[in-house]
Amino acid sequence: MYFQTTQVHLQQDRAATGSGPAQSKLVLQPRLTPKCINKIRDGVVKFVARDMRPINVVKGKGFRKIMKILEPEYKVPDCKAITAALKIKHDRLKEKVMAEIVCSEAVSFTTNLWTSLQMEAYMTVIVHFIDEEWGMRSVVLEMKHMPEMHLGENIAARLGDVADAFGIPVENRVADVIDNGPNMVVCVEKLLESGEWGEGVRCSGHTLQLCVKAALEQDSVTRTVGAVRHLVSHFRKGHKARAGLREKQEQQNVTKHELIMDVTTQWVGYCGGTMLAHCHSGL
């Protein structure tokens, strides 16, 4: 505890008495307790984890400045302390997820192989199951760097390692949802050979995407799509063209839409007013 005399309190005393000499007022302000310090640190850790911020965000001048305003006495932890706190939270959350999965009699898997902006390959493993309250649950078990070749054997080995790490019983691994890629087909074959996994299920979304892609490769459709792409490219690259399009939309009192160039590995459609999107990712 410490004492602090402020000018604000002197002014308040004058206003209260109306006249007479100002009297100072002693105000007791508690220092940060260990409980309060832990609560703030926990909040910082949750901020880093939930918003997927880099750990070194705590070293930023802007972050430290706002923390100084919010709580001047609080000392922001260094990256090492935040890393240790994140590890503790990860282990606790992993135990919670394992406890939920073990109560389910059937678990299915989906995988996602993707490349970061730094051109590094990663593999994500997701499980799907019904919890004790009959609610559908989907949990990301792992998102890990995968420098090895994306061969079916390697993917199968990675899936097995993740399932073992989370203690998922062999008899509960009922299905693995895959896309139509040759490496994923081999992956399922390897898993079935081991006798520890259920059947592979082809992703209906990816299958539908392949059907749409085959239809778009017809000559008549290809010419039409090519013309539309050329038109979209004209408006996307030219500032004057975009401005002219917006002006025409205003004159005709129609909704202002931006033209979007299609992506060959992604198919987007509308069904019942709901947008359905599927990327060639195995999900």
Image (spheres, rainbow, N blue to C red):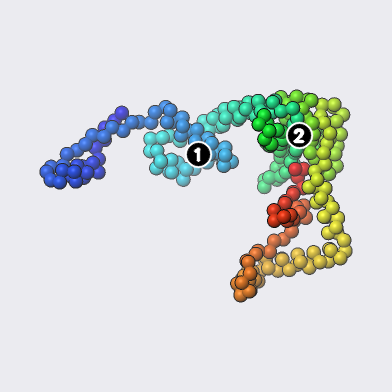
Q: Position of residue 70 (x, y in %)?
A: 41, 41
Numbered label attached to residue 149: none
**In this orientation, does residue 219 appear?**
yes
Q: Which residue corresponds to the image point at 57% horizontal and 39% vertical from the top-left?
A: 50
Q: Is residue 154 above or below residue 220?
A: above
Q: Secondary structure at mark 1?
A: helix
Q: Position of residue 234 (x, y in %)?
A: 70, 68
The residue at which mark 1 appears reads as 58
Q: Position of residue 55 (x, y in %)?
A: 55, 38
Q: Nearer the viewer, residue 261 or 132?
A: 132
Relative side of 92 to 124, left or right: left
Q: Which residue corresponds to the image point at 40% horizontal and 38% vertical from the top-left?
A: 71
Q: Is residue 245 above or below residue 160?
A: below
Name the residue type under label 1: Val
Name the residue type under label 2: Ser
Q: Nearer the viewer, residue 10 or 61?
A: 10
Q: In which quarter of the view is residue 138 placed?
A: top right
Residues under numbered marks 1 and 2 in contact, where contact means CB atoms less than 8 Å apart:
no
Relative side of 254 to 9, left or right: right
Q: Is residue 44 above or below residue 240?
A: above
The residue at which mark 2 appears reads as 108
Q: Position of residue 272 (x, y in %)?
A: 72, 55
Q: Secondary structure at mark 2?
A: strand
Q: CA distance from mark 1 to mark 2?
A: 38 Å
Q: Which residue corresponds to the image point at 17% horizontal and 39% vertical from the top-left?
A: 23
